[in-house]
Structures are given as structure tokens and as C-alpha cells.
Amino acid sequence: MTESKRITLYSAVDSPFPHRVRLALEEAGVTYDTIWIDLMNKEEWCPSSYTAGPKLQPGDEPSADAIRIPESVVILEFLADILPAASLATRGPSIALMGFIFLGASLGTTLAVLEDFQAMLQPTGFVVGDWSIADATFVPILARLYLVLETGLGNFTPEIAKEALEALRSPRFARLQRYWDDITARPSTAKTWNEEEMKAIAARRMDRFRQTGIVNRDIRVPIPTT
């Protein structure tokens, strides 16, 4: 990427999707710019995740000829293609756990999704052995799941949170626990995951959700009763 064509990542602390991309960029050792946005007060023109064009500053709108990619999984595949030396390739699972956090999806279904993911893991290492974009796809959502369970910030009862944590810490999920320990030990995770900052934002976002039913700008549901 030349100086005139720089990677700009539009990121939000509370969104797992640009977090995926940050993880991959850090693992690849790529120089990139980050513009932080507030998803509750987002500019209409603001792209969801990524542009490639002249260097931008907060408040700048990308030029008309900038490459824009809004979908995080597509960005991961794009990075794997343009950065072959970084060994990011190998498509990984995209597991939607946000329905449990916000929309009251059942704990049983959520644990079954996690079991399916656990079954994909190699005996050691990561999804395919070495770290890859498969991990970048899944880890941001897993990180937020652990956070809301431990803090009670999800749209579920304290009893459900306790049951979920007991299950995740049981022998049933021993391999997933080891995977999480390995992931959190990586510098890319430490650099891109600020738990204290995320707690404050998650609390604000969940408070808004409980009052309005707004998940994000595109998703609004009946006001939850939990």
C-alpha cells in the first residue's frame, strides 16, 4: 500500500466487526490509520469498516475514488489476498452470538453454537492450527460474550448468566477455555481489546437498547421486557 493509498479503518469500540479487521491488521504487521466513530452518532456517509485511499482525519469524508469495503468478513478475505506473506488465509466460521446478547436467543442454542465452534478447533493452537482470519472472525464476538456474561450487561437474567458461565467453565468446554487463554495471550488481542472501555460502552449501549429497542442504526426490535 503506497503512501497515497493508505488503509483507513473506521472502528468503534463496541462493535466486534471492525475489531476483527484490527486483529488481522495487527497480526499482519500492516501500517494503517484508525478513525474512531460513535455508533450512536454516526455520520450518514461514514463507511462501516474500511477504505483505501488518501490519508484521512476524523471528520473527513473519503474521496469518491477511494476503495470502500463495508463487510468485515469480506475485508478479511481481501487482506488475505493482498497480504499473502502474512498467512492470514483460510476461511473461518462466522458465528452469530449477538442474538443471545441483545435479542433473547436461548442459552441452549447459544451453547450449541459454541460447541460446534469448539469441535472445529485443532487439538492445539487455533481454528486451523496457526492463527488465521478464522480467529479474527470469531474472537471479537466471543470476547463480548464473555464480557456481558461476567458483567450482567446482556439482555438476560442473572440466573442465565450464571448458568452460562458455569457451563463455559466446565469440562464440556475445556478446549474452548484453552483456546480463549491462547487468544488472550496474543499481542494482537491485548492491543485491540480494552475491557474497561468496553464495559462502559456496553453499559451505555444496553441501557439505550432497554429503553428504545435499538440494537444499531439498522436493527430495532420491540422494547425488551427482561
Image (cartoon, rainbow, N blue to C red):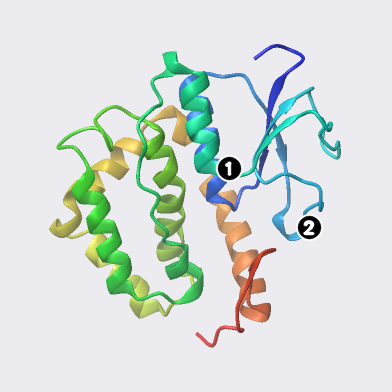
- For the point 17% across and 51% down, the residue is 174
Q: Amino acid at mark 2?
A: Asn
Question: At numbered mark 1, what does the secondary structure look like: helix, strand or loop?
Answer: helix
Callout 1 touching callout 2 (CB < 8 Å) = no
Badge 2 density bin: few <14, some 14–19, many ≥20, Cα 10 Å: few
- The picture quadrant where one finds residue 200 is bottom right
- For the point 71% across and 21% down, the residue is 6
Q: Amino acid at mark 1?
A: Pro
Tell me: 15 left or right of 113. Answer: right
Question: At numbered mark 2, what does the secondary structure look like: helix, strand or loop?
Answer: helix
Across and down, in percent, residue 54 comes to 79, 22
Across and down, in percent, residue 215 comes to 61, 68
Q: Where 226 sits versus 49, above or below?
A: below
Tell me: 209 left or right of 83. Answer: right
Across and down, in percent, residue 173 comes to 20, 55
Q: Where 9 sits versus 119, above or below?
A: above
Tell me: 187 left or right of 198. Answer: left
Q: Which mark is residue 41?
A: 2
Across and down, in percent, residue 225 comes to 54, 88
Q: Nearer the viewer, residue 1 or 210?
A: 1
Q: Residue furthest front?
A: 65
The residue under label 1 is 18
